[in-house]
Amino acid sequence: MILHFFSPTGWKNWGFPSRPLIRDGMPVLIDEDLRFEDDNGPRPTVAMNRWLQELPVSGAPSPNTWRTYAQQLKSWSEFLAAHSVNVFADQSRLRAALSAYAEHRLSGPLGARLEGTSWNLAVKTIGTFYEWSMRNGYCTAVPFSYAEGSYLRPDGVRVQSARNLAIVRGAKRHATRKYLERPYAELLMNALAGNHPDGEPDRSFRGRETGRNAAGVALALSTGLRLRELSHLTVWELPPLPRQHTPVPIPLPLAPPTAKGSKGRQTWIDYEALAGVHDYVSLERAASADASRWLPGDPLYVEEPTYAGARINGTYRRWHVLTPAERRRLVAPCGGSALLAVQSDGSPFVDWATVLRRTSARVRERFDPAFPHVSPHMTRHTFAMTTLERLVRGYYQRAAQLVVDTDGDNAMALYLTKADPLLVLRDLMGHASVATTQAYLHLLDTQRIFREAYEETSPTPCEQIEAATEFQDSDAR
């Protein structure tokens, strides 16, 4: 089976009266003979592609999520085809195939084997597809078995629920590390800056760009930015540093084109992290970018930049409309890339995964053999845990109340004095609903109270998969 990603480029030459109603970047599954129907009528790929095309309006707006769903369906379909089983065969055939597929994926050849979390994501994806197929008349039964149960909501209403029995239990709690506890986060930051764990300079360190690397990772840890968001932030979108130190975080708006699912949001950044980024901008970054001769193909020249936007090739544009591809082509007025992080020649720097991988390896070799393999997504998980701990313990709320009590008009402070911790974290993480945030926290193995909250909310399959794909992204990096 072929996995293709649709592009509308050149559609006027295809002989169609209008542009096809398919989203740019939407995955399309095609049988190897390039046919969507045969003598028996439409093939299962027709239903698969219809389901994929409805995802943007069914609670899954992110192209990364569409790709993940399509890859799971592709693997399942190819396995069925290899065993001469139709995607919409009768239930007994599908259940037999599912049993063999579980063996293949969980204990089969090394190249096909999945970890528990990846298998559970596959089960949830395939299950959601079959439930949709039943509702739309493509099949009469699903291959999965469910354990029926119920729970009592806080308002006293008993609600029925179902658990897919193909889901496997993961590793024992605390057996794996998905986020950095404070000592490890401090160790990472010292290593990025070229220091020993005690903060003293490491004379044996021969790396470069320590200011950029430390500032960038501190920014990620303080904001919860995804890799694409971190890599495509322009230097002028950085909030100005307040004149005085403040315990209340500073708002950081994110442009929709850079965010997951093109859903812009506002996160925040601590004063200390913001000060470190400003130091990098004024010192190391300025030395690399100013008077740089770097030019991309088809450059976009920036003039008169402000916090909101700039003149780009002579036309005023706001930052929040620029796509990642356009941002990589921006050339600053003094030379070099307009992105926040640059290389020594002033060109854009986006390879944070390599920085974290190499730094983690150095820490394990030099200082702590148990130090984890850190990925960009682990910084996001760490932000979630650190922020949740502070919210639950009231740190941010107390700091915000001090601002309000002294007649401050800080909008962030007013928000923090009134908002529920989970709602705050939902907004900062950019989740579609608080149920996604609760499922996300459940996967991070947080305190019992939040696991119980997750059980009580019974998130929908789309919300469960949205949270699970966060960890799928982490495994991929």
Image (tube, rainbow, N blue to C red):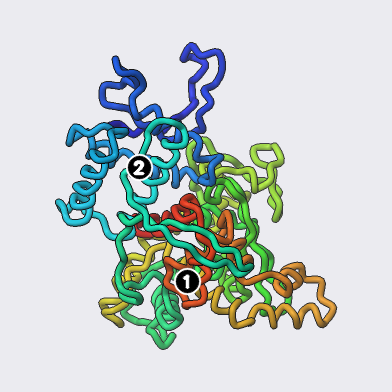
Number of disc labels = 2
In depth, the one of 289 and 120 nearer the eye is: 120
Q: Position of residue 385 (x, y in %)?
A: 50, 73
Q: Is residue 403 visible?
A: yes
Cα distance, mark 2 to mark 1?
28 Å
Chain-order first, disc 2 or disc 1: 2
The residue at which mark 2 appears reads as 142
Task: Identify the residue at image location x=44%, y=46%.
Answer: 65
- At mark 1, the secondary structure is helix
Q: Position of residue 217 (x, y in %)?
A: 47, 68
Tell me the residue at 23%/38% (across/down). 93
Asked which quadrant contains residue 29, the reply is top left
Q: Residues within 10 Å of mark 1 (few under 14, many from 20)?
A: some
Query: Which residue position holds label 1?
Result: 451
In the foreground, 263 or 461: 461
Q: Position of residue 142 (x, y in %)?
A: 35, 42
Describe the element under mark 2 as helix, strand or loop.
loop
Residue 69 higher or lower than 376, as above or below: above
Horizontally, residue 36 falls left or right of residue 161, namely left
Circle 2 or circle 1, nearest the eye: 2
| Residue that lies at the very extreme toward the left in this rendered image | 109
**Which disc is residue 130 wearing?**
none
Residue type for callout 1: Arg
